[in-house]
Amino acid sequence: MNTTNDQDAGGVPAKRSPKRTLTTSRRLGWAVRQARRELGWSQEELSAASGVSRPQISDIESAKSSPRTTTLFELLRALDYELEIRPLESGSRLDNALRRTTDDATS
């Protein structure tokens, strides 16, 4: 169960490896930092606009911690961004399930 494609006996995907989570945290932190810099804001200014503490913003940007969902939404709102959730690739199980549900509803 060390890779992201492993499944348990019931076909349920295994948890992602710590390396994958770390990469995602780094990307998220980089994105927050870039958005903040594009606005010309300091961490203190983002803190004032979002209500998230400056040390917490620093930890998120440096991937020392991952934000809770509510914290992420507060940061995104202050930076004038939104979160979009979509399948990684076409043909994913979720994508196929949603397509079947839509097809059933229109039949």
Image: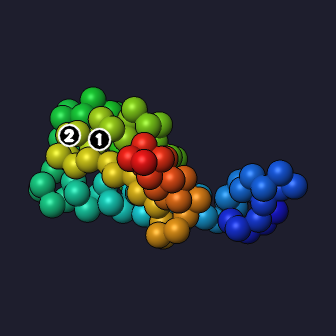
Q: Position of residue 71 (x, y in %)?
A: 38, 35
Q: Position of residue 19 (x, y in %)?
A: 64, 65
Tell me the CA gap for discs 1 and 2: 5 Å
Circle 1 is placed at which residue position? 75
Proximity of marks 1 and 2: CB atoms separated by less than 8 Å = yes
Work out whether residue 81 can be spotted: yes
Asked whether 80 or 12 is in front, the reply is 12
Residue at x 44%, y 52% (from the top left corner): 103
The quadrant in which residue 73 appears is top left
Asked whether 75 or 8 is in front, the reply is 8
Residue at x 12%, y 55% (from the top left corner): 39
Residue at x 26%, y 47% (from the top left corner): 82
Q: Is residue 97 above or below residue 92?
A: above
Residue 22's disc number: none
Disc 1 crowd rating (10 Å Cα; few below 14, some 14-19, many 20+) is many
Residue at x 41%, y 57% (from the top left corner): 86
Tag 2 secondary structure:
helix
Q: Position of residue 21 (x, y in %)?
A: 59, 58
Circle 2 is placed at which residue position? 78
Q: Is residue 73 above or below residue 22?
A: above
Q: Is residue 78 left or right of residue 15?
A: left
The quadrant in which residue 20 appears is bottom right
Q: Which kind of residue does numbered mark 1 sit on?
A: Leu
Disc 2 crowd rating (10 Å Cα; few below 14, some 14-19, many 20+) is some
Q: Is residue 38 left or right of residue 33?
A: left
Tag 1 secondary structure:
helix
How many numbered circles does the render carry? 2
Work out whether residue 25 can be spotted: no
Q: Is residue 98 left or right of residue 70?
A: right
The quadrant in which residue 48 appears is top left
